[in-house]
Amino acid sequence: AGYIAVEMAGIFHGLGSETHLFFRGDTVLRRGFDPYIVETLMDEMQAHGPKLHPNCTPHSLAKDASGKISLSVSDKMTKALLSVGGFDCVLLAIGRKPVASQLGLERAGVSLNKSGHIEVDAFENTNVPGIYAIGDVTTTGYELTPVAIAAGRRLADRLFGCEARA
């Protein structure tokens, strides 16, 4: 589970909803996060909630006659197909896919990679002089809002603050 899934599960749990967090690995936040923070977070969530379901890959959703939803998952450890039910709603935080293709960047000559991300260098420059891109739509791999905000500030410093290496 990524940052958004963990954040939303924490919010719903904190508001008093019975909340379950299913994730594919042994822990949440497996990529790009400090392992000590992840370990502490896992300890706190195990102690206080939400209900954690590690090593589970979503398989299907089904609604029963009463309108409750069941989630079937493949358990990575046992290879069994498990069903957990009784949910009023299910939030899928399954990652994001860029939609830069809808911006018409090809008319300006801006390059996108095979996955649809805008290709940029270390300073947010695209292949077209004067066109820049920041955030999760780029090839930088940074998908968190605070990182994009910081990149935007550095770009503004470079463009308008005379700080060439900001």
Image: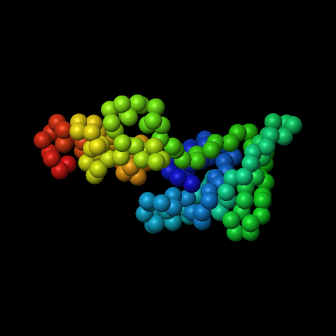
Q: How many marks?
A: 0
- Left or right: 147, with 36 as reference point: left
Q: Position of residue 71 (x, y in %)?
A: 74, 49
Q: Can residue 127 be seen in this view?
A: yes
Q: Can residue 149 be seen in this view?
A: no
Camera-nearest residue between 18 and 102:
102
Identity of the residue furthest to the bottom in this view: 77
Camera-nearest residue between 49 and 101:
101
Identity of the residue furthest to the left in this view: 162
Q: Where is residue 61 in the image (x, y as percent from the top left)?
A: 75, 45
- Left or right: 16, with 41 as reference point: right
Residue 104 lies in what quarter of the image? Answer: top left
Residue at image position (79%, 43%) is: 62
Residue at image position (47%, 41%) is: 98
Residue 1 lies in what quarter of the image? Answer: bottom right
Residue at image position (19%, 38%) is: 159
Residue 11 lies in what quarter of the image? Answer: top right
